[in-house]
Image (cartoon, helix red, strand yellow):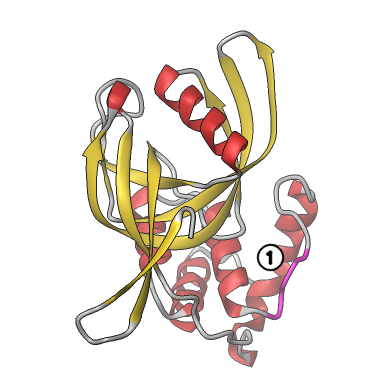
Amino acid sequence: MGWFDFVRSPAGASVETLRIPLFPLNTVLFPDGILPLKIFEQRYLDMAAACMKDGSPFGICLIAEGNEVGAAAAPHPVGTLATIGDWEMEQLGILMITARGGRRFRILDSETGPGNLLLANVELLADTTPAAVPPERLRLLPLLKRVVGDLGPERIPEPHRYDEAEWVGYRITEILPIQNLAKQKLLELEDPLARLEILEKYLDQRKLLG
């Protein structure tokens, strides 16, 4: 099965698990999101090279304790799979990549490998049931469409799924100038409709909606 494995949970349901390297950062990556990264530490250069060679993902998690550089940081338990799209190395030892967010995961256990690279066994979180943006939340869309138009397809690539509550919620959350811990909580939230409700209240309070 390659990188993936399937185990049985205590309740008898299938759980999809994966062993991946982790890249703890002071930012949050959302599913279908785009994150440009500048990589210069040897552990992450080696990680990126292996991922590109094998076509395998790595995990991006918000740092709970520690720093991006140096000793392995302690990550928040829920993160997002990342795959490498574009990359370039104009300067020796500095790799520029574009990471694209995939499925969310929860860390089951982790260990520090060679070079202080974190390796983790993770459970892939089930995709939420597709839900349409409810009529009472449609007022979020003009703001999002303006921002998407300003940022362009390189930052928010097509398809733009303005009818899907989860996609809309993730895109609004990632562009808001709010604390990373708040973004982390919204990433972890299972209900896409509840996420939209929270975002609407936040934007309403700041008079950012028409």
- Nearer to us in this view, 65 or 146: 65
In the image, farthest residue toward the bottom: 135
Quarter holding residue 119: top left
Quarter holding residue 84: top right
Give, as a three-letter code, the residue at label 1: Leu
Asked whether residue 210 is in view, the answer is no
Is disc 1 surrounded by few (<14), some (14 to 19) or many (20+) residues within 10 Å? Answer: some
What residue is shown at x 63% (from left), y 74% (from top)?
140
Pinpoint residue 141: horizontal percent, then vertical percent: 69, 73
Up the image or down, 196 lies above or below 207; here it is below
Report the span colored magenta: 159-163
What residue is shown at x 39% (from left), y 38% (from top)?
26
Q: How many marks?
A: 1
- Nearer to us in this view, 176 or 45: 45
Pinpoint residue 92: horizontal percent, then vertical percent: 61, 8
- To which residue does mark 1 refer? 143
- Nearer to us in this view, 195 or 40: 40
Q: Is residue 83 left or right of residue 104?
A: right
Q: Is residue 137 left or right of residue 199?
A: right
Up the image or down, 84 lies above or below 161; here it is above
What residue is shown at x 24% (from left), y 32% (from top)?
66
In the image, farthest residue toward the front: 1
Pinpoint residue 27: horizontal percent, then vertical percent: 44, 43
Q: Is residue 106 left or right of residue 41?
A: left
What residue is shown at x 79% (from left), y 49% (from top)?
152
Question: Split into 4 quadrants, where in the image is the C terminus?
Answer: bottom right
